[in-house]
Image (cartoon, helix red, strand yellow):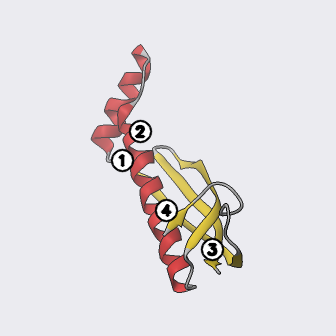
Amino acid sequence: MLLLNIDHIPGKEMEALGLVKGNVVYSKNFGKDFMAAMKTLVGGEVSDYTEMLNEARAIAVKRMVDEAQKLGADAIVNIRYASASVMQSAAECIAYGTAVKIK
């Protein structure tokens, strides 16, 4: 599956199949959340949260690709990502784009 964050595939004709998306609400366990809170006292990257968002993004992308495959897509164009805090130590990550069939 070709994944692009531009709205076309250079040199190819496409048929738009529709919007596809994948999302997940993801959290870390209490122990890692506590250690991340301690990290905020001294500053720097909170690597547990970076890891959490990377894992969430990967799950969201897989779900988006699965949805596109059900439509018979060859690619997803104009991909975007968003994330939001749902509650303390839990974040939603969404990936969305336009599923296309290459002609």
The residue tagged 1 is 28
Q: Say if 80 sits above or below 44 in the image.
A: below
Q: Nearer the viewer, residue 11 or 34?
A: 11
Of the numbered discs 4 and 1, the one sitting upstream in the chain is 1
Q: Position of residue 2 (x, y in %)?
A: 52, 65
Pointer 4 with pointer 1, Cβ within 8 A: no
Q: Position of residue 88 (x, y in %)?
A: 50, 44
Q: Amino acid at mark 2?
A: Tyr
Q: Nearer the viewer, mark 4 or mark 1?
A: 4
Q: Say if 2 sits above or below 92 in the image.
A: below
Of the numbered discs 2 and 1, the one sitting upstream in the chain is 1
The residue tagged 4 is 61
Of the numbered discs 3 and 2, the one sitting upstream in the chain is 2
Q: Nearer the viewer, mark 3 or mark 1?
A: 3
28 sits left or right of 98 in the view: left
Specify the label residue 99 is tagged with: 3
Q: Secondary structure at mark 3?
A: strand
Pointer 2 with pointer 1, Cβ within 8 A: yes
Q: Quadrant of residue 34?
A: top left
Q: Label 2 vs label 4: CA separation?
A: 18 Å
The residue tagged 2 is 49
Q: Amino acid at mark 3?
A: Ala
Q: Label 3 vs label 2: CA separation?
A: 30 Å
Q: Label 3 vs label 1: CA separation?
A: 31 Å
Bin the neighbour count of mark 2 within 10 Å (Cα to Cα): few under 14, some 14-19, many 20 and up: some
Q: Say if 96 sits above or below 66 in the image.
A: above
Q: Amino acid at mark 1?
A: Lys
Q: Quadrant of residue 22?
A: bottom right
Bin the neighbour count of mark 3 within 10 Å (Cα to Cα): few under 14, some 14-19, many 20 and up: many
Please report the residue visible at 53 percent of the width from the left and 49 percent of the height from the top. 87
Of the numbered discs 3 and 1, the one sitting upstream in the chain is 1
